[in-house]
Amino acid sequence: MTGTSLAGMVFGGLLVFVRIGGAIMMLPGFTAASVPAMVRIGLTVALTAIIAPLVAGLLPALPATPILLAVLIAKEAAIGLTLGWLTRVIVIALPVAGQIISYQIGLASVLLPNAEIGAESTLIASALNIGIPAFMLGSGLFIVPLFGLLASFHWLPPGIPAGSVAGIDYGSIIHGIVAGVAAEFLLAIQLAAPFLIVGLVWQVGLGFMTKAAPQLQIFFTASPLQILGGLILLGVTVVPMIAVWNHAAARLLIHGFSP
């Protein structure tokens, strides 16, 4: 084996490693501070060893200039980060629904830090966010992003086609980002729909009670009942809600990773 062919093999593996590493950096469950960096690096190396031989025919030759080399590496990093981010956006619809539910049942003041949604995250959203890796691993949902990552080398092959800027279709990327965010919030609203409907009826009822008995302290009377009723409804609907989320997230991910 000549030095040139060996350098080409190393360069091809590097491109695969950069794309997979960018996706792993953004995938839900692996971005938490509690996940050691060695776990992320080990998973990236393992997936590179599996995927690189499968896409060897799609990998470009070693570029002649350092500038072109940097452009190719930056392109693969951008693709990996985008794919991982889109996966994260779709999956995080479950904790977003938990945030909406918390507002509806009166637990919006229970604030806990959450790196996924932001500092002002509620208890229910944090609990659902912590459970996302278990839900994905237990249901097999994690397979969809991995197959999508493999398929991305076929419909977004490494290299720079002639007549393109860094080989990236920016219009498609922007369209995918907008569609992913829209799908996330739509799915979150659908998951929290029972609580939105019951909450609307509850607030209308409280309005009638206020008109009927103005001297009654409605807030102090209704708040405990609202929290209790909301927790009971959450206990009844949490399992179907996770099942609906799993099915919808799989469908959206399959659609999102299709060319």
Image (tube, rainbow, N blue to C red):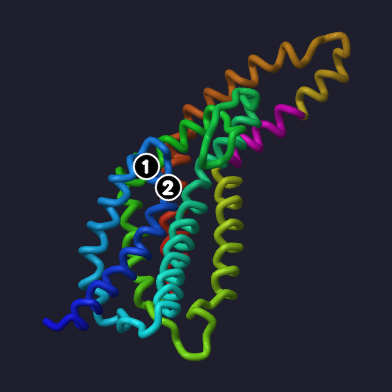
Q: Position of residue 150 (x, y in %)?
A: 32, 68
Q: Position of residue 117 (x, y in %)?
A: 56, 41
Q: Are marks 2 and 1 in contact (CB under 8 Å)?
A: yes
Comparing 233 with 93, the one in front is: 93
The dominant secondary structure in magenta is: helix
Classify residue 220 by image quadrant.
top right
Give me the residue at 42% from left, 63% from top: 80
Comparing 203 with 208, the one in front is: 203
Q: Position of residue 189 (x, y in %)?
A: 60, 46
Comparing 1 with 252, the one in front is: 1
Give me the residue at 59% from left, 75% from top: 171
Task: Identify whether 197 is placed above or below 148.
Answer: above
Q: SS class of the residue under badge 2? A: loop
* Residue 70 falls left or right of residue 124: left
Task: Identify whether 246 is placed above or below 165.
Answer: above
Residue under numbered circle 1: 133
Please state the extent of the stretch shown in magenta in the rendering: 192-203
Tell me the tag on residue 28.
2
* Residue 58 falls left or right of residue 203: left
Figure disc tally: 2
Mark nearer the N terminus (2 vs 1): 2
- Does the magenta-highlighted stretch encompass residue 196? yes
What amino acid is found at the position of numbered circle 2 in the picture? Pro
What amino acid is found at the position of numbered circle 1 in the picture? Pro
Q: Residue reaching furthest left?
A: 1
